[in-house]
Amino acid sequence: MASAAAHLSFSLPFPPFSSPRHRPVTAFPYPTTQSQNQSRVSLRTRALGPDFMGDFGARDPFPAEIASGFAEKVLGNVDTEHKILIPNASALSLAKQDCSPISPLQPPLSVDEAKALMKKVVGWRLLDEEGGLKLQCSWKLRDFKSGVELINRIYKVTEATDHFPSLHLEGPNQVRAELWTASIGGLSMNDFIVAAKIDEIKTSDLAPRKRIWA
């Protein structure tokens, strides 16, 4: 029985990736059913934006995959155009986003907007004070030296954002951080972005040692 070969090709609007892992599969044959013998399938895949997510691409199928005839189980028309949708900034983690300039005319986030964004940060409290909404987070640490070290780590993380929290070293072993945008009298997206970046700071080596009872 004669057999025909179908080809899978990628058409990208920008130059090929230099990394071998990103080298698209230009063509590979796989078995098809008799009803497909008279046609060739050409599937075009487009990336609709820059690669925000990092590593994506194609790989050669494993021999077992080819032997299974997986292509026969693919749904869709032979002329279907497949698109790779790249997530926009709103879909990315807040910690991966950059702070933006804030105009004094920009209104602060509402209580409902702030509560929705609270789901994207860890350990922060939403304070509703006379001066406007604020974010607050506290850490109990091993000792005074650990508190100073945490403040230094927070400064290193937030230095590039140019949006700094208010930091307080309270007592011998506690640090408190507060975030708000003073120029608009409340919270902005920048406050949540910085809070998410602070969440990623390693603090396990600064935490109080646990007592082990014999």
Image (cartoon, helix red, strand yellow):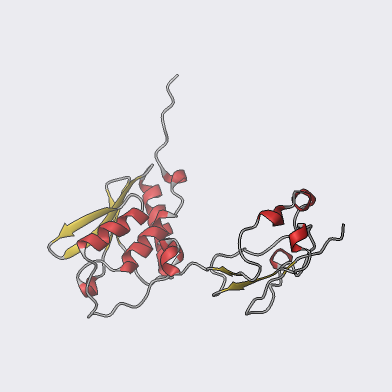
Residue 65 position, x and y percent, is 74, 51
Q: From the viewer's perspective, is 36 left or right of 143?
A: right
Can residue 157 be seen here? The reply is no
At 22% from the left edge and 74% from the top edge, which residue is drawn? 107
Up/down of 139 relative to 85, above or below:
above
- The outermost residue toward the left is 130
- The outermost residue toward the top is 214
Can residue 54 be seen here? The reply is yes
Residue 117 position, x and y percent, is 31, 59
Residue 200 lies in what quarter of the image?
Answer: bottom left
At 38% from the left edge and 42% from the top edge, which residue is drawn? 142
Residue 199 position, x and y percent, is 40, 54
Q: Quadrant where the C terminus lies? A: top left
Residue 127 position, x and y percent, is 20, 56
Residue 181 lies in what quarter of the image?
Answer: bottom left
At 77% from the left edge and 48% from the top edge, which residue is drawn? 64
